[in-house]
Image: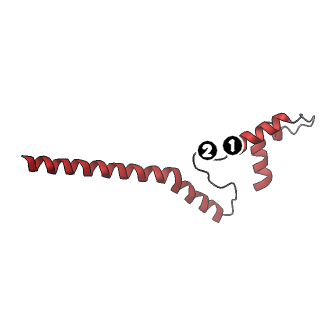
Amino acid sequence: MSMELDRLAIASVGAVVAVVIWLGWSALNWVWLRPRRLERRLREQGLSGTSYKLLFGDVKDSSVMTERAKSSPISFSQDILPRVLPFLHNSVETYG
């Protein structure tokens, strides 16, 4: 009886470890490996852009540019994109 419980416990622990390893690999693939592969393929095709940054991406840069655009006075021209979407405007100007 004790031997059967030991085998069952070992099998259960092994199954749990296998599931945890699989979930960890899936998360790593989703968060880091797949975006880096996609970035590399896009660069091979000639598309440049900002590098992949884990979790938050370009949020900090975007918020800094938005605050800077809000603090400057509005020009009276019809070109409002630098004021409304400064990060997008900068990306288009920089990367095409």
Q: Are marks 2 and 1 in contact (CB under 8 Å)?
A: yes
- Give the number of the disc on residue 48: none
Q: Residue furthest left?
A: 1
Residue 78 % position (x, y): 89, 37
Rendered residue at 75%/44% (across/down)? 87
Rendered residue at 87%/36% (across/down)? 72
Residue 41 % position (x, y): 60, 62
Q: SS for tag 2?
A: loop
Residue bearing mark 1: 60
Q: In front: 47, or 10?
A: 10
Q: In front: 79, or 65?
A: 65
Q: Amino acid at mark 2?
A: Phe
Q: SS for tag 1?
A: helix
- Give the number of the disc on residue 56: 2
Judged left or right of residue 24, residue 86 is right
Q: Amino acid at mark 1?
A: Lys
